[in-house]
Amino acid sequence: MELDFQKEIRLRGIAVSPGVACAKICLFNENRHANLAVYHINPNEQNREKNRFDRARQLAMRQLETLRRSVSSQIGPAEAEIFSVQADILNDKKMAQEIVELIERTAVNAEAAVVSRMDSYEARLLKVDTEYIRDRATDIGEIKRRLLDILANLNPSLQCADQPQCQKGRNRIIVAEELTPTLTVELDTGQTMGFVTERGGKTSHAAILARALGIPAVTGIAGIHGALSCGTELLINGNTGEVVVWPSEATRSAMLAGRTAAAPDDGTGAQPVAGFSVMANISQARDAAEAVLNNAEGIGLYRTEFEFFAANRLLTDDEQAERYISVVKIMQGKTVTVRLLDVGGDKSEPFFGITSEPNPYLGLRGGRFLLSRPDLLSSQARALAKASVHGPIHVLYPMIIDLQQFLALKRIFMEAIKDMNSGTIFHGVMFEVPSACLQPRDLLGAADFGSVGTNDLIQYLFAVDRNNERVSTDYFPDRPVFWSLLQNMVQTARELKKPLSVCGELAGDPVYVKKIMEIGIERISVSAKLIPGIRKAALANKKKLMAPEN
């Protein structure tokens, strides 16, 4: 199709990440391997090519680990597992052996063998009827491109057709044939307005990352990459899947005025909604600046384990205290909720000393891990006590299973700080294990507050691995038993006059704002980027509730 003229044209795709954005486009070019060197080799050159492939494979795995750490810190551990999946594919001995054998059997260079074998895998996956399996072909294609980049010493980048005017994606909508996880996270996502692609479904890894980043995305518009030029203006609606080329002023005004999901904001954040507090999730102290920028009403979840992951070692009392104090100071009296180390499961590093477990999600995690390492809990307690001198601290205990476990952890914490000068410290329970959610009266009776971690709660309540795409269709909260469980906890918290908030992916989805408010939840914590959109959805719902009936 040919769309490169300034007349409004409406297209319909698949909505994969909510939000509305209007901006000029940058075209991402994935054809950098079009002139790939493919040739036959002499028998005495086989070892050289096999070594080149092995080196490329090892380097690619190191790159993927770096990406995993970065995404885990900046976005979240579940999203970071995308790159663990790619590393597992790359580490598959059978696949590697097939490529080596191809070099030997057909006497071709490493590039030719990689392309031949990976294209074969990709083609097979694309023929499968199931969408989530077809979307895994993206991983194969991305692994292939990563290997070829290393073999050719290329650095992938945003490449527009109109190079002199290319903005490298800054304040633009990215149009690509396919949205890949690497493209999604390696762009300056803080200044990316949206994504539009020809291929890629709702369950694709890139779509999951786009939603986590709060970037609107639409896919499934065949031929759009080749039909547009860099600089074409687009209006995209990630809620409905609509894409408008060269939108009129009337269309632009109508669609932007009606947006309710998380979309790029003017940098000031939407104003707070009375009776509905929206706080920010952060992974490192530096993230608190973005929380302030988006006018967060506090820090609802500070994932402190990511400070250790970023440093790649255990942190001392003083190193931890320095980070916590900086967050308390920048929030200027607003709530700061610090979750104690929540490691194990999908979040483990050698320096924590956790040995391999058959089922780590049901193993030494959260509260159990802290009980097994009172030295780490005590160190964190002392650091938080130092920070509390500068302002109140809400300490959140992770993966609590019952009252006895919570009290045991709290005793270790209090023993560690008994001789220290400290300020106000509140102690709270993370409700994410079903056993804890079934005894909210006992736990909230002993705790100062509670927070519901919906990601793990859904996982454990419905016995579904949230990182396993084969069962991803079962990982959703639209079941009466889930909301009934939440409502019971809300009612108990009200009776005991204890604050109860909700964090996790559910809280950051505008689709569920209405339901959250209906069952009486008055405070949530989400990624800072999502705050403006969530507040807009909350305000719209509140106006509907207050509107007089006809």
Image (cartoon, rainbow, N blue to C red):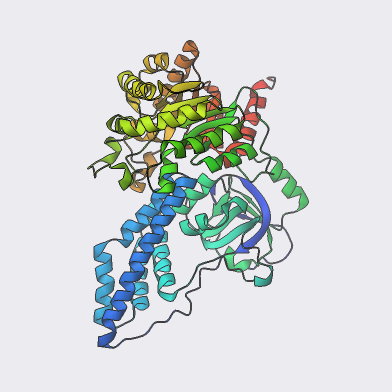
Residue at horizontal 36%, vertical 45%? 467
Furthest-right residue in this view: 249
Furthest-bottom residue in this view: 42
In depth, the one of 32 and 464 nearer the eye is: 32
Res 395 visible = yes
Q: Is residue 406 above or below residue 366?
A: above
Q: Is residue 300 left or right of residue 100?
A: right
Q: Is residue 193 left or right of residue 406?
A: right
Q: Position of residue 9 (x, y in %)?
A: 68, 58
Residue at horizontal 60%, vertical 27%? 333
Q: Quadrant of residue 379?
A: top left
Identify the image quadrant of the N terminus. bottom right
Q: Is residue 450 above or below residue 101?
A: above
Residue at horizontal 62%, vertical 28%? 541
In depth, the one of 264 and 325 nearer the eye is: 325
Q: Position of residue 61 (x, y in %)?
A: 36, 61
Q: Position of residue 533 (x, y in %)?
A: 61, 38
Identify the image quadrant of the C terminus. top right
Q: Position of residue 252 (x, y in %)?
A: 72, 49
Q: Is residue 54 above or below residue 332?
A: below
Furthest-top residue in this view: 495
Q: Is residue 67 above or below residue 539?
A: below
Res 242 visible = no
Q: Quadrant of residue 88?
A: bottom left
